[in-house]
Image (tube, rainbow, N blue to C red):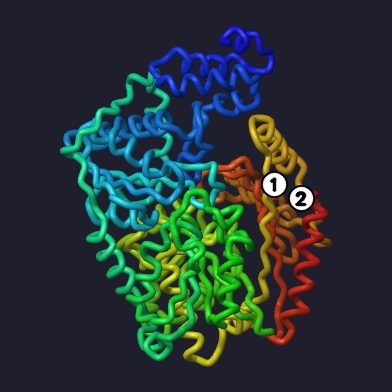
Amino acid sequence: MEGTLIESTKIDKATKDRINQWLNGNYDSQTKDEIKGLIKGGKEDELIDSFYKDLEFGTGGLRGIMGVGSNRMNKYTIGMATQGLSNYLKKSFPGEQLKVAIAHDSRNNSDYFAKITAEVFSANGIKVYFFKALRPTPELSFAVRLLGCHSGVVLTASHNPKEYNGYKAYWKDGAQMIAPHDKNTITEVQNIKDVSDIKFQRNDALIENIGEEIDSKYLDMIHSLSISKDAIKRQKDLKIVFTPIHGTGIVLVPDVLKKFGFTNINVVEEQSKPDGNFPTVVYPNPEEPDALSLALKKAKEIDADILMGTDPDSDRVGIAVKNHKGEFQLLNGNQTGSLLLNYLINAWKEAGKIKGKEFIVKTIVTTYLIDKIAADNGVKCYNTLTGFKYIAALIGELEGKELFIGGGEESYGYLVGDQVRDKDAISSCAFIAEMAAYAKDKGVSLFDMMRDMYVKYGFYKEKLISLTKKGKSGAEEIQQMMKDLRNNPPKVVAGSALIQLKDYQAQTIKDLKTGKETPTNLPKENVLQFLTEDGTLVSARPSGTEPKIKFYISVNTPLSKKEDYDKVNIELDKKIESVINDMNLK
């Protein structure tokens, strides 16, 4: 069998070496039998994809398909990541009693992987605070800060398909790791040359179960940020439909809504039970309309005011509101983020809390409508690279100097207040409901608020094109696409001349009229942005955690009155279609 493998011309030497290391190393017999089964079955493509590289930290940490191999999520890749992190923590905090917190979501094997993580940390003499049952990712971030931990880990693949799982690593500030900590941890992981270097011997004396006592403090913190308490009192029977899509949202979203004072909360029963197979959806992702179809059905049945759905680890939330025709309409992440930040800024303003040192944060691929709203209200708006860890890093950097109101990114992740350092669908659900109550108290709908916002600042419309390119050949194809765009940028997009090219890898902003270059003042990342004369913006970005390349399209035009919404909406759709055709993004 191993001879068959060596004779294969399709599998390169480095991949063969990894496979043989697993076949001959100190791995359990079940793991070895699975590898032999792949060899015997002639499944070379699967072998290559399982072993051609090691899993690396991307914008979402460690993430991959579950199974055997160095490029898969399993006991050993989890063990190596945790051993590497343990080694790095010991170097970073010499002489200290190290503490970590661990949580997991509802995915298959998340609880098992969490236990492996606790075993390895404790075997390394590290104190572990272990959430005894599934909990939302943002609560883990909160717990790291609350308990004075040096690090934290949550086992989740967020909104990915059921075959995936992941390992999000947090630093002592409660934020996901960024440079240099992520790279240094990977270096430590790569220094582990043999599986026998991983300490799997659990030390029960160092593992402490946690749960409800953290929930209570977390919910109190979120409630302390509420602004429109009187509006909620008057609109407490606001009809809310909520679905956790078989994930952790069921643990705390109904509780936080009740704590805010809402009394009419309707949970989608078919999706209320945590289940890693996500039986009612294809993808457990609130960005996918199908994932919210059962919630939409319920919303129509009860004539709801607001619909909200969270992903498995409750860091993202999708919403639907009734439009001007009385039909339920799903909002995208840019629309929800703009509405939420516009509400927060205006509510702070009404409360006399804007003093000139307040700021919000968004990512470079999130709608620039938010920048306009902030500027109009005397609030700073910072832009970061994609990934909420960069937003969190900036919040930490400005702590004590400026005051954070809220932040968000187009991929349905938002944050209110700075006590959590990751996107937080628990607090977001509470504030989206508060915003809906605030609007209803003023006799308008959230959709009306959105149209009024467009009249004031311009009608911005965005679309995400995501092209999946699987395996090693897919990764190479994505690299080539970025190379071509970098070397031969389009001259005209949707009838408008290109005037600016931002290359975040080269860290330059080039004015194409004058040829002048200025720095991006952001870390290096493989992202390109093309800006045209009429304000159309196209961003190209390979995903850090999935075999995808993403294109973010943003177009805008004035909206003179809200009654013109439908007509202008169609015009912007046509413009987006022109961008897709011109840049061959199909």
Query: Residue at image x 36%, y 55%?
Result: 135
Query: Residue at image x 50%, y 28%?
Result: 68
Query: Residue at image x 76%, y 56%?
Result: 498
The location of residue 465, given as percent across then percent down, is 69, 54
The location of residue 438, given as percent across then percent down, is 46, 85
Q: Secondary structure at mark 2?
A: loop
**On the image, numbered disc 1 is attached to which residue?**
467
- Look at the numbered discs 1 and 2 and tell me whether their residues touch, using CB distance below 8 Å: yes
Query: Residue at image x 29%, y 28%?
Result: 200
Left or right side of 152 for 127 = left
**On the image, numbered disc 2 is attached to which residue?**
585
The location of residue 100, given as percent across then percent down, is 27, 44
Q: Can see residue 184?
A: no
Q: Image quadrant of residue 218?
A: bottom left
How many residues crowd around disc 2 within 10 Å: few (fewer than 14), some, or many (20 or more)? few
536 above or below 325?
above
Q: Image quadrant of residue 394?
A: bottom left
